[in-house]
Each structure stands twice: as structure tokens, then as C-alpha cells.
Amino acid sequence: AQKITQTQPGMFVQEKEAVTLDCTYDTSDQSYGLFWYKQPSSGEMIFLIYQGSYDEQNATEGRYSLNFQKARKSANLVISASQLGDSAMYFCAMRAGAGGTSYGKLTFGQGTILTVHP
Amino acid sequence: AAGVIQSPRHLIKEKRETATLKCYPIPRHDTVYWYQQGPGQDPQFLISFYEKMQSDKGSIPDRFSAQQFSDYHSELNMSSLELGDSALYFCASSLANYEQYFGPGTRLTVT
């Protein structure tokens, strides 16, 4: 079974500063994928970034980067140059198995509410 | 780029009624997932389909059923609705089990 833990219920950051959202995971699988999603108050679930367990480089997508530390089982999201529009709930999620297989349900963490102050 | 389409976006039903939620995945995506997100909670996996066959099942009540059709759209059927079924229901799709892209969700309110 997979477990995702997000220990920060809420985080505050000043506009234009960087912020790190923590995520630790637990799994016995050798192959897995890690995801971050953003959920604004409107409710939609927006895909941000993906890291495969065998990827040697940390994933980056624009202002988002994933600090993947496999030995510590952590997959922290770093948002650089925060913007007011970044205020939202952020979920870390895990998928068992590698890409290319026929299964892939996501297990989510509890989420972190990020508030960006002007 | 085309996204996942869900309909309806909002649905109000009374207890013991039935509801049908529809999902149209991103074209050429081969897997569809359904998730339920209760108020203030994280999404919980319900069921998934790979190439129109059920591929995995989570904590889906027996009152719920789902299927994927030949055109790859999927429907989640919910019967004997209870107050606790009020939630945001997401459909997501992926190609070859890589990134999952979520639809906008259907907000179901049971009164």
C-alpha cells in the first residue's frame, strides 16, 4: 500500500519569493510515480509536475521544480517567484507502477493550503 | 489542447434518487479514472478502466457502478443516493499510465 504525507496544513509566502511544500511517501514498490496537483478555490485539479522513481534528474516545469530525494522518500515541490495566483490547495500524489502499465490509481496526501501575500 | 470533459458540472439530487455522471477523456488516452473528493478531503480513487475494461477498483460503494463505452467515454451511475455522497467527482484520463489529467469535476449535492 502507498501512503503520502503532507505535514504542512497551511503555508504563507510573500509574493515573488520561493516556497517549498513538503511531501513524504511510503511504498514497497520499486517503480512508482510522484505527482503534484494544484486545486484553486474553483475546484478543478490542475496537473503541475511529475517525477518517475527511476528519473535521475529532478523534474522541472517552468516555476515548479520537484526536489526528489529517493533515499529519504521525499518529493518536495518548490515554487519559485510566487504569484498571487499561486494561492490554492496543493496535493502530492503517488502512483504505483511504472508508466506503460495498465494500472495507475493515485493516492493523495492531505494537501497544503498555500497563501501568497502581496 | 483538448481536456477531459465532465457533465454535468453541478447536480442536485434528493436522497434515494439516482445520478449519472459522464466523462469524455482526452482523445487517444487509454485509461479513465474516477475519484471522489468529499468536503475538505483529498480525492479518493473509486474505479478505473483501461481500454474499456475495468482495471482497478477502490472504495466504491456497491450502489455505484461504472462503465466505459466503445467511444471511450465513461459513466458513473449512482443509485439510492445518501447525504454522504455529496462530493466533487472527478474523472481523469491518461495515456499508458503516465500523467493523469483531471476534468473540471461534477459537484453532486444530495438533499
Image (cartoon, rainbow, N blue to C red):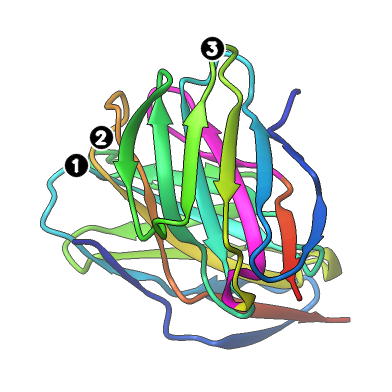
Bounds of the magenta segment: B84-103
Left or right of A56, for residue B8: right
Foreground residue, A64 or B100?
A: B100
Q: Name the residue under label 1.
A: A31
On the rendered structure, is A50 left or right of A117?
left
Mark 2 belongs to chain: A
What residue is drawn where x is 64% and y is 24%? B26
B41 up-or-down from A75: above or below: below
Disc nearest the viewer among 3 and 1: 3
Image-quadrant location for residue B56: top left
Q: Is residue A57 above or below residue B68?
A: below
Q: What residue type is labelled 1?
A: Ser
Element type at mark 3: loop
Which mark, residue B35? Answer: none
Q: Which of marks 3 and 2 is in front?
A: 3
What residue would you read off at disc 2?
A98
Task: Point out the image quarter for the C terminus of chain B.
Answer: bottom right
Q: From this viewpoint, is residue B11 visible?
A: yes
C-alpha gap between disc 3 and disc 1: 31 Å
In primary-sequence order, the first of circles 2 and 1 is 1
Q: In this view, does B59 lie to the left or right of A49?
A: left
Q: Quadrant of the N terminus of chain B?
A: top right
Q: Which amino acid does label 3 sit on?
A: Ser
How far is disc 2 from disc 1 in space, using C-alphas? 5 Å
**Magenta stretch holds residue B85:** yes
Could one spot residue A82 in this view of the protein?
no
For the residue labelled by badge 2, is the local secondary structure a helix, a strand or a loop? loop
Q: Judge by depth and name the residue closer to the eye, A3 or A115.
A: A3
Position above or below: A35 against A116: above
* Residue B97 coordinates in the image, percent (x, y): 38, 31
List x then y, in percent, for residue A13. Answer: 70, 82
